[in-house]
Image (tube, rainbow, N blue to C red):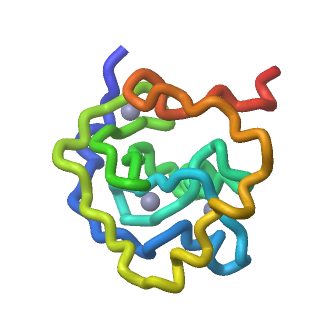
């Protein structure tokens, strides 16, 4: 199966230096995902709020890029497969206040195994059990 959404990949400017919604509600995230259609920055499925997937569910923008830090891989939510997004989008993490929002000191134990990023950027959804 081949992803048919590669033509939706655009050069985008990240909308925020961190997950937009988490910044608004004062939450935190594990990794960031950048929407390659509109530049929305959301948090990954390992984060408590899963805003990147929520963004997909709302907008149907299929392709996200691993973005925290820029990791150079993409993921299609529709086909659930890794896609080539070309050169990583540079991070725009310049606001030092955002560093205070980083979860390092508030990350809940235990930190779950980090999936091998190049084989599966998404962890298995826990509700699938
Ligand atoms: Zn696709
Ligand atoms: Zn979020
Ligand atoms: Zn989008």
Residue at the image position 32 percent from the left and 38 percent from the top: 73
**What residue is drawn where x is 48% and y is 33%?**
121
Can residue 103 be seen here? The reply is: yes
The percent position of residue 53, horizontal first and vertical second, equals 59, 48
Residue at 61 percent of width and 74 percent of height: 101
Q: Position of residue 20 (x, y in %)?
A: 56, 72
Q: Is residue 8 left or right of residue 48?
A: left
**In terms of image quarters, where does ligand 2 lie?**
bottom right
Between residues 21 and 7, which one lies in front from this camera angle?
21
Work out which residue is located at the far top of the displayed protein and give it. 1
Q: Residue 55 appears in which quarter of the rendering?
A: bottom right
Q: Quick one: 110 or 14, which is closer to the camera?
A: 110
- For the point 74% across and 62% down, the residue is 106
Percent x, y of residue 111: 70, 40
Relative image position of residue 75 (x, y in whole percent): 41, 37
Which image quarter holds the C terminus? Answer: top right
In the rendered view, would you say 38 is above or below 119?
below
- Which quadrant would residue 79 be assigned to in this image? top left
State left or right for residue 120 relative to residue 8.
right
Question: The N terminus is located in which quarter?
Answer: top left
In the rendered image, the vertical position of residue 29 relative to residue 109, given as above or below: below
**Residue placed most toward the observer, 61 or 17:** 17
């Amino acid at each position: 199966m081949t992803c048919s959404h590669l033509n939706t990949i655009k050069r985008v400017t990240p909308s925020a230096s961190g997950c937009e919604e988490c910044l608004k509600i004062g939450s935190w995230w594990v990794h960031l995902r950048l929407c390659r259609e509109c530049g929305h920055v959301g948090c990954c499925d390992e984060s408590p709020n899963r805003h990147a997937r929520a963004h997909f569910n709302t907008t149907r923008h299929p392709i996200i890029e691993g973005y925290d830090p820029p990791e150079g891989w993409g993921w299609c939510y529709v086909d659930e497969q890794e896609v080539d997004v070309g050169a990583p989008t540079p991070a725009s993490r310049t606001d030092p206040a955002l560093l205070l929002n980083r979860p390092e000191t508030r990350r809940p134990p235990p930190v779950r195994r980090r999936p091998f990023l190049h084989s599966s950027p998404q962890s298995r959804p826990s509700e699938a059990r």
